[in-house]
Amino acid sequence: MPAIREADVIYINNFKFEPSLNQEIRQILTASNLCDGVKIFAFKPLAAFADMDLTT
């Protein structure tokens, strides 16, 4: 899997993620493959994104 750049927009389980908004999320995505990323965000979507506006 290629490295994720800050400009990338990631869609996982129909949620839009912009890794540049959160360094921790970018590190998780960079360190994991997409299957692991789906599992991570399926378990912790609200905790990770409660303070983020995902509509933009």
Image (cartoon, rainbow, N blue to C red):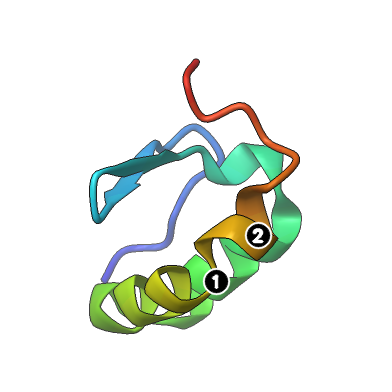
Determine which of the numbered discs, if any, sits on residue 6 in the image: none
Q: Is residue 39 above or below residue 9?
A: below
**Residue drawn where x is 27% and y is 72% of the image:** 34
Residue 16 image offset from top left, x and y in percent: 38, 38
**Residue identifier under label 1:** 44
- Measuring 42% from the left and 62% from the top, which residue is drawn there? 3
Residue 27 in picture, x, y percent from top left: 62, 69
What residue type is disc 1 on? Lys
Instruction: Please give the name of the residue rendered at 70% of the width and 48% of the height, measured from the top-left corner.
Output: 22
Label 2, secondary structure: give it: helix
Observer-nearest residue: 26 or 51? 51
Local packing at callout 1 (Cα closer than 10 Å; few below 14, some 14-19, many 20+) is few
Mark 2 is surrounded, within 10 Å at the Cα level, by few (under 14), some (14 to 19) or many (20 or more) other residues, namely: some
Judged left or right of residue 23, residue 16 is: left
Left or right placement of residue 35 versus residue 37 in this view: left
Between the C-alphas of marks 2 and 1, the distance is 6 Å
Reply above or below: 21 against 2: above
Identify the residue position indicated by label 2 in the image: 48
